[in-house]
Amino acid sequence: MNDATVRITVNGQPVEVAEGCSVAAAIARLGVPFRRSVRGEPRQPLCGMGVCFECRVCIDGVAGQRACMLQARTGMQVVTDG
Amino acid sequence: MAERYDVLVVGAGPAGLAAAQAAAGQGARVAVLDAQPRAGGQVWRHDVRHAPSAAAARGIHDGLKPPIEWLAGTSVVAAQGDALLVQTPQAARWLHYGNLVLATGARELLLPFPGWTLPGVVGAGAAQALAKQGWPLAGKRVVVAGSGPLLLAAATTLRAHGAHVVAICEQAEASALRGFAAGLWRWPGKLLQAGRLRLQLAGVPYRGGTVVQRALPAADGCLLRAVGIAGPRGTERLACDMLAVGYGLIPNMELARLLGCATQAFGAHAAVQVDARQHTSLDHVYAAGEACGIGGVDCARIEGAIAGLAAAGAAVPAGLLRRRGHARAFAAALRRTFALRPQVHALASADTLVCRCEDVTLGMLDGHADFRSAKLATRCGMGACQGRICGAALAELGRFPHAGSRPPLFPARLSTLAHAEPAS
Ligand SMILES: Cc1cc2nc3c(=O)[nH]c(=O)nc-3n(C[C@H](O)[C@H](O)[C@H](O)COP(=O)(O)OP(=O)(O)OC[C@H]3O[C@@H](n4cnc5c(N)ncnc54)[C@H](O)[C@@H]3O)c2cc1C
Ligand code: FES
């Protein structure tokens, strides 16, 4: 629909996605876990709609943000917990 | 600063948008808020690659048309008197209302089974939502599983985003599905929709009476590689990169519970109890759509319109009430058809994690009489999701009845909690 893109970094790596994509979709491009569980297992999104918190990451220094609920915006710095 | 609205609508899905439109049509000052950054709710969720359907575009446009105020990315943190404390990523404030409409919709029922915590295992509706928001799917092999019509809708979206749908595994028996299809003539619109989905999914095997028993990891143990399924033809393995599995929908009850609305049983779960005018047990609170029990998009539209009119103090036309009855009858037929079989409730074993936030297994809950005692001993349900996933799963499995939610609804910032009292 729209060719505009946004650029964010995930763990320091640049990622470019179409405008309107979620932060979760951008992280998925790298295939890294979003977080580690209490026992150290890698986890990725489960519910896709803000309920499960499996997608939580640190965005621009603020921890515990749900990547499935936020649109990627140019300049965002995302750090996964994996 | 405190703002006041005649009608405040929580949830910008089909129900909330219809409520806002109806109330504004009566001259009420209306605001709609939603935790999501974009309006549309679940079924009309914005798709980054595909244009919305005409119904979605119209519904969203009409439901947010000025002077209706649209408060995007706004979540409810607490409630007191006739006010809600809400927060956006930037700020917190109190919103006062004359009447409140709860159109909080539904979420997926996600049930534990061996391997369900592996990256690559997501809900069925979740896969659809992730796809619409740009999750990379081109060339990915996906098994869609669980139960209900949402599996067909999810598979269609996944395909449209370039995924290869390996199979749709529906737990309901093929005989139940045939019986349901035979009764569809009573709802011609649904028949048409079902036919259209079947066409879009041409070539994808739809297997009745089939359950995903386990998700199997690749050699590194960290990524999904295949699923083990069991059906009328015995057990089998299907190689895949993603498993999209969901067992139907359950109402989002947090806000209704927080306010103290009376509820009614919805299977092992709860729904908001309403009267013919969508009025809850509380004086100034109405509810509409999936929050009142899963009814689908048409039902959500009708109930939203009724709630919006009632909340604005207007009369509700008899025709709307009749149409709601018809839509609810369809929902009841769906529920009978896709009732979960006991096999689904027995998928998790003692060493399967139920609480994903705190890594608590089903076996660790043995010996606890209720959710409260299990929580204190194991931390089950005490993590970031506040028991939303495991609480619903354990209720469905018949382990513990659902525990109520307490404010804050979602983790609030300390600066938000500093606004603890509404300014009147
Ligand atoms: C993941 C998923 C996918 C679905 N896909 C389809 C589909 O493809 N086709 C179909 O016919 N049906 C689908 N459904 C069924 C769908 O729920 C209904 O058809 C329709 O969306 C119901 O409308 P609604 O307005 O009642 O609720 P919803 O559309 O669920 O809207 C509720 C809205 O309320 C918001 N909300 C909830 N609580 C709060 C709160 N406390 N604060 C702020 N905002 C809040 C939510 O963010 C959401 O946007 C899907 C359901 C789910 C859960
Ligand atoms: S994937 Fe569940 S909260 Fe984001």
Image (tube, rainbow, N blue to C red):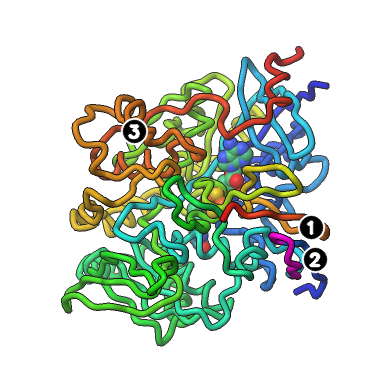
Residue B165: x %, y % from top left: 44, 79
Range drawn in magenta: A10-16
The answer for how far apart the CA atoms under marks 2 and 1 are is 6 Å
Mark 2 Cα shell of 10 Å, populated few (<14), some (14-19), many (≥20): some
Q: In the image, is B136 to the left or to the right of B363?
A: right
Q: Is residue B316 visible?
A: no
What residue is at 38 percent from the left and 45 percent from the top? B359
Per the image, label 3 sits on a secondary structure element best described as helix
- Chain label for disc 3: B
Q: Would you identify the image quadrant in which residue B113 lies? A: bottom left
Q: Which residue type carries mark 2?
A: Val
Q: Which residue is mark 3?
A: B378
Residue A13: x %, y % from top left: 73, 66
Q: Which residue is mark 1?
A: A73
Please tell me the numbered disc located at residue A6.
2
Q: For residue B291: magenta?
A: no
User: From the image, which quarter does the C terminus of chain B lie in?
Assistant: top right
